[in-house]
């Protein structure tokens, strides 16, 4: 892990009448190993802040440092932006953003295979990450064959396997909370408790097979065996 420092960071989306000043001079000091939670109303800039630390957004003014490294800096026409892949920062997104066509094992191995990690090390580290989130038995499943909580654990393992300097979570539990809102008689409950073998009536939209929003199985367009089938 590493310290994170933001010094008067500004971020504006768009330009002219459509522009939005999302971060207005944010300063923050996080010590190495420190864990903090950002709270704020919807639209207040939480995701934007995480994205600027990860390098997914550039900044308009100010400076971001990770450990001893300046990773973003903007001052007038002077700009510095270290690309995301060179920051050693992992982000767990609210949607988990797992690759639907890759197994659990391959999703977790993906960041290592993008780098120059030796094959034997990839296998060892993926195994350790799988064990850490207690998913050893599901390594050959695809994300569409997992529960929401299991997907969340895959996303966590994938974020941690590369031993990042900074780990950012953008409300990764939110989808689970939504699931649990639905009791047997309300919300998603009636859908989730439908008889085994009954097809899910909610068809996933084209290109969004990974999450139908009802049963959370991308195979839901097929006939499946209730909550655990496939
Ligand atoms: N790509 C974009 N282009 C233009 N405006 C954007 C863009 N992304 C975010 N915004 C705006 O920036 C503001 C901050 O958005 P952000 O996503 O950081 O909020 P948030 O605090 O994460 O909200 P939530 O709790 O709803 O996730 C919002 O007003 C949003 O509409
Ligand atoms: Mg957000």
Image (spheres, helix red, strand yellow):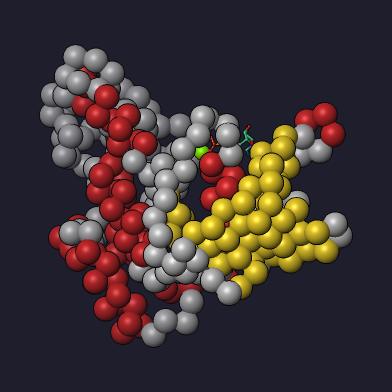
The N terminus: image quadrant: bottom left
Q: Residue at x 23, y 59 (%)?
A: 133
Front-most of residues 49 and 136: 49
Coordinates of residue 107 in the picture (x, y in percent): 36, 61
Is the residue 33 above or below the residue 193 in the image?
below
Q: Position of 101 compared to 184: left or right?
A: right
Q: Residue at x 27, y 24 (%)?
A: 181
Is the residue 171 above or below the residue 56 in the image?
above
Front-most of residues 168 and 201: 168
Q: Total marks drawn?
A: 0
Tell me where residue 80 sits by quadrant: bottom right
Residue most extreme to the top = 185
Q: Position of 139 compared to 170: left or right?
A: left
Q: Is residue 95 visible?
A: no
Is the residue 67 above or below the residue 175 in the image?
below
The C terminus: image quadrant: top left
Q: Is residue 143 visible?
A: yes
Coordinates of residue 105 in the picture (x, y in percent): 29, 64
Q: Residue at x 72, y 34 (%)?
A: 20
Front-most of residues 154 and 104: 154
Q: Residue at x 63, y 47 (%)?
A: 26
Tell me where residue 204 sits by quadrant: top left
Coordinates of residue 109 in the picture (x, y in percent): 36, 69
Q: Position of 43 compared to 177: left or right?
A: right
Coordinates of residue 54 in the picture (x, y in percent): 56, 58
């Amino acid at each position: 892990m590493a310290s994170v420092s933001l010094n008067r960071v500004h971020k504006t989306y768009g330009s002219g009448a459509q522009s939005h000043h999302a971060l207005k001079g944010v300063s923050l000091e996080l010590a190495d190993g420190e864990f903090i939670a950002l709270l704020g109303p919807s639209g207040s800039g939480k995701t934007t802040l995480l994205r600027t630390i990860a390098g997914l957004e550039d900044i308009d003014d100010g400076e971001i440092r990770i450990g001893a490294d300046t990773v973003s800096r903007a001052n007038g026409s002077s700009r510095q932006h270290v690309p995301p892949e060179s920051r050693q920062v992992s982000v767990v997104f609210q949607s988990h953003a797992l690759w639907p066509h890759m197994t659990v094992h391959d999703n977790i191995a993906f960041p290592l295979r993008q780098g120059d990690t030796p094959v034997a090390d990839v296998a060892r580290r993926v195994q350790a990450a799988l064990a850490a989130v207690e998913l050893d038995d599901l390594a050959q499943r695809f994300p569409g064959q997992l529960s929401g909580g299991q997907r969340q654990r895959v996303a966590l393992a994938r974020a941690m396997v590369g031993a990042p300097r900074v780990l950012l979570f953008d409300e990764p539990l939110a989808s689970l909370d939504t699931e649990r809102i639905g009791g047997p008689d309300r919300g998603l409950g009636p859908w989730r408790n439908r008889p085994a073998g009954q097809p899910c009536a909610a068809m996933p939209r084209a290109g969004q097979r990974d999450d139908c929003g009802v049963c959370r199985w991308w195979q839901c367009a097929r006939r499946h065996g209730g909550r655990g089938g496939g």
